[in-house]
Image: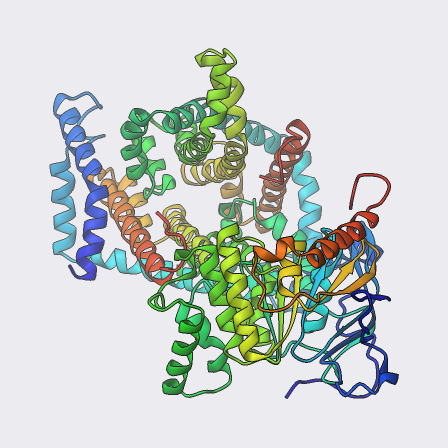
């Protein structure tokens, strides 16, 4: 089984409850229990809508738009989060300086700053990337800071006694040892960047999957609303599972994550 | 070649000595420095011209506006509306989530039934459900509170589940041996033992509830802090937007701190923070 | 600092240079003092330690829990700096860790992301030994610690005893003159411990390294060492230095009944007990 096959199997296993729900959904609609067909269109209608959008390319365009932003935001968040997190974790003065600011910003709902972001970055892609970045940053940063500060010193000492220079212990010992926890934070960050970008597009935007949902709502095109949410959910699931597989492969030497 | 020197006794060899008083004072000193630096940058950047003042007003201006806003009735009403939804949503999520999660942790049947729902629910961004809820239930409080519940439920259920699963069997046997009935065992053994995990999930849920609440208000408008902020945005009242953001951020921070302190005092036997 | 010798025999004083000693001590620590600081205050861990180890000697440091015997070891190794005093190895002052002073910790020091082979090959790789030679060298040491067949295993898949074998091989492969051991068998079950102790002695007898071994087990100290330093409670000083004149090779069971063993055992326990403060609570 190739890699794609294995990802598919991993998802497929989880998908079967989804199929059950789709079945229930269709059943309920058919019986008219969940309101009228407008509010809760049958799966068939949603699928038709999706097919139309796939055929004329709009769906893939919107996916590409949204996920370009997601990857941009995520990449930025990981780089900044790991670099700053490592500095916080290893250098006590940095930890002291950043602690109040980070503790204050961490519990803040980043979406509260989103209107301000649109003022600074405008109504286009940049503000969505900014929100995605803000949502993804903190899990990565905190996980990295915690992980790098908790590396067993005797591991570093062993490396020193085997001929490693002090600066080299950073990438020979600290980073590998901290990697499991960093990747756990990175996984949460991935979810954050998806949520952030999508939400930003929903609130105010001109393109992307989030905006698709908002426009469909306003134009009373309910099947398209469902296409939007299902697409983002599936994409999120796919990315999350892929990340997990990557993590478990990279970290074969440590505990597996589910 | 050993990197040593031969010029007599060396007394301090990177001995890492820091005076205890310094160790107590330094974090606060540097912390204050950090805050001052951040606020200072915020103050200077627009004034000096690194950022356009129309995009990012200086900190002092925003601070001034904060006090103006706090004095307004309009703000107070919106704050009230938001708080009501937030507390109601959180409360309901707790009332449903903790029992559900702990039951899942102790009874495989419950786990098997509920788990697929969690698995399906997990990858769906709850904020994406906002408009769908409005579609189903209209733009009034049912959907707003509903979305908060939807947002917090999963973390609460999962943490309660992990907490209940982690209760050592021996604890349960001891309780049974001491004659505790089913419900008593539940309240007096499972819940306390699962408490650290549950509280950890709760802390997260508090933040998620605020987040979902704001997202719904920014999206659906009506009333509430999010709507208030968006109106200011529409009206081009930049200062007001920043002031609202600052207030909401502070509220989020305070709620989190309140929770942590409350846990520390109310549950003193807990080791470490949640 | 006194030294006890078996009755009648002329005892060699380790720091009596006037005896025309032809051996420069391998390790020499003088007046070592260590103070730690935390938010709560300062703690004097080591008051003033004088310590000597001759080349090829097996020296053990025993003491009550928390007395800082590991700290002393770390200072000798150059991992921790002393507040006062100095440590010289081969006459040169110790300022930093170095491959000539290998260390084996009790646990958690293996690199979990590397296999057994990866861990052991780490030192030679840092020394720039080319791959082919490295392979041979690693194989030799894997065989030496009896881990043949486990090359590709990760530390998480190994038992405690096996992990310590890896740790030992990882340190020995860079051929240090001095071997520092920080309660290496402390987390191992009793049966495996006996086996590892015997293997350690075998390796020591073949390689003639200077070993400084920290333990809280008096039995282990008596079984393994040439000399034993007994430390006091905090603020720690050397209470006594005892020469273990039990003939080698030592059998772990029969020495238990040797009168010399019994005498030393009692002596050490007396010293450890005397060091206890009057009130029961230790820091």
Residue C47, quarter of the rendered image: bottom right
Q: Nearer the viewer, residue C229 or B79?
A: C229
In the rendering, at what x and y percent does residue A69 appear?
Answer: 37, 60
- The reply, left or right, for residue B116 in relation to residue B176 is left
Q: Is residue C23 visible?
A: yes
- The reply, left or right, for residue A140 in relation to residue B106 is right
Q: Nearer the viewer, residue C102 or A103?
A: C102
Residue C135, quarter of the rendered image: bottom left
In the rendering, at what x and y percent does residue C203 appear?
Answer: 52, 73
**At x 21% / y 42%, what residue is drawn?**
A15
**At x 77% / y 59%, what residue is drawn?**
C230
Q: Taking B157 as reference, is A123 above or below it?
A: below
**At x 62% / y 49%, what residue is drawn?**
A103
- The reply, left or right, for residue A158 in relation to residue C52 is left
In the rendering, at what x and y percent does residue A38 appear?
Answer: 19, 30
Q: Is residue A119 visible?
A: no
Residue C209, quarter of the rendered image: bottom right
In the rendering, at what x and y percent does residue B5 appear?
Answer: 75, 86
Colour style of the rendered protein structure: rainbow
Q: Taking B36 as reference, is B105 above or below it?
A: above
Q: Taking B139 as reference, is A174 above or below it?
A: below
């Amino acid at each position: 089984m190739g890699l794609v096959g294995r990802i598919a199997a991993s998802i497929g296993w989880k998908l079967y409850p989804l199929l059950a729900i789709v079945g229930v959904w269709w059943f309920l609609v058919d019986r008219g229990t969940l309101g009228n067909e407008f509010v809760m269109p049958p799966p068939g209608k949603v699928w038709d809508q999706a097919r139309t959008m796939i055929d004329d390319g709009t769906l893939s365009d919107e996916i590409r738009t949204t996920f370009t932003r997601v990857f941009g935001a995520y990449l930025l968040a990981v780089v900044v989060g790991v670099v700053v997190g490592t500095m916080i974790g290893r250098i006590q003065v940095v930890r002291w300086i950043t602690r109040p600011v980070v503790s204050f910003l961490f519990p803040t709902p980043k979406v509260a700053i989103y209107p301000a972001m649109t003022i600074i970055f405008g109504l286009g892609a940049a503000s969505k990337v900014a929100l995605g970045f803000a949502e993804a940053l903190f899990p990565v940063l905190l996980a990295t800071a915690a992980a790098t500060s908790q590396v067993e010193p005797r591991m570093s000492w062993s490396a020193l006694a085997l001929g490693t220079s002090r600066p080299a212990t950073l990438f020979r010992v600290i980073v590998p040892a901290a990697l499991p926890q960093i990747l756990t934070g990175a996984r949460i960050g991935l979810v954050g960047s998806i949520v952030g970008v999508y939400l930003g597009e929903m609130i105010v935007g001109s393109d992307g999957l989030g905006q698709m949902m908002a426009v469909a709502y306003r134009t009373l095109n309910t099947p398209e609303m469902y296409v939007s949410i299902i697409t983002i959910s599936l994409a999120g699931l796919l990315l999350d599972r892929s990340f997990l597989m990557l993590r478990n492969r990279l970290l074969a030497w440590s505990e597996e994550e589910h | 070649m050993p990197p040593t020197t031969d010029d007599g006794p060396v007394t301090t060899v990177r001995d890492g000595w820091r005076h205890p008083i310094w160790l107590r004072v330094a974090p606060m000193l540097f912390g204050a420095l950090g805050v001052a630096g951040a606020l200072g940058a915020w103050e200077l950047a627009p004034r000096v011209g690194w950022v356009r003042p129309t995009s990012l007003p200086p900190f002092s201006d925003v601070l001034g506006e904060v006090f103006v806003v706090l004095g307004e009735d309009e703000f107070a009403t919106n704050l009230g509306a938001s708080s009501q939804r937030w507390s109601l949503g959180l409360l309901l999520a707790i009332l449903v989530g903790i029992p559900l999660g702990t039951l899942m942790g102790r009874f495989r049947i419950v786990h098997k039934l509920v788990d697929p729902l969690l698995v399906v629910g997990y990858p769906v961004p709850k904020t994406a459900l906002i408009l769908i809820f409005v579609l189903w239930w209209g733009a009034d409080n049912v959907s707003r509170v509903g979305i908060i519940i939807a947002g917090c439920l999963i973390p609460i259920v999962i943490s309660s589940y992990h907490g209940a699963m982690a209760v050592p069997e021996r604890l349960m046997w001891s309780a049974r041996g001491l004659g505790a009935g089913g419900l008593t065992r539940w309240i007096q053994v499972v819940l306390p033992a699962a408490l650290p995990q549950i509280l950890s999930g709760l802390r997260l849920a508090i933040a998620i509830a605020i987040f979902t609440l704001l997202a719904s208000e920014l999206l659906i408008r009506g009333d509430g802090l999010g709507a208030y902020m968006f109106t200011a945005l529409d009206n081009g009242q930049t200062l007001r937007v920043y002031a609202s953001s600052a207030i909401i951020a502070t509220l989020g921070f305070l709620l989190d701190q309140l929770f942590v302190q409350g846990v520390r005092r109310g549950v003193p036997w807990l080791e470490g923070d949640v | 600092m006194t030294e006890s010798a078996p009755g009648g025999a002329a005892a060699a004083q380790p720091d009596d240079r006037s005896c025309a000693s032809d051996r420069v001590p391998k390790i020499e620590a003088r007046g070592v003092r260590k103070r730690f600081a935390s938010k709560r205050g300062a703690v004097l861990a080591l008051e003033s330690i004088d310590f000597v180890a001759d080349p090829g000697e097996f020296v053990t440091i025993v003491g009550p829990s928390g007395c800082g015997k590991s700290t002393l070891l770390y200072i000798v190794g150059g991992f921790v700096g002393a507040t006062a005093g100095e440590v010289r190895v081969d006459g040169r002052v110790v300022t930093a860790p170095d491959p000539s002073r290998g260390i084996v910790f009790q646990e958690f020091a293996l690199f979990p992301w590397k296999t057994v082979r990866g861990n052991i090959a780490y030192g030679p790789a840092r020394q720039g030994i080319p791959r082919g030679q490295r392979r041979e060298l690693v194989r030799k040491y894997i065989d030496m610690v009896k881990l043949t067949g486990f090359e590709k295993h990760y530390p998480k898949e190994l038992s405690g005893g096996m992990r310590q074998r890896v740790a030992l091989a990882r340190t020995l492969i860079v051929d240090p003159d001095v071997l520092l051991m920080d309660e290496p068998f402390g987390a191992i079950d009793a049966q495996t411990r006996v086996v590892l102790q015997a293997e350690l002695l075998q390796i020591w007898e073949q390689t003639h390294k200077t070993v400084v071994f920290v333990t809280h087990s008096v039995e282990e100290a008596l079984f393994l060492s040439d000399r034993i330093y007994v430390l006091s409670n905090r603020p720690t000083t050397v209470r006594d230095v005892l020469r273990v004149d039990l003939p080698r090779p030592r059998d772990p069971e029969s020495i238990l009944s040797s009168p010399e063993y019994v005498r030393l055992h009692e002596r050490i326990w007396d010293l450890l007990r005397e060091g206890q403060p009057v009130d029961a609570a230790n820091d």
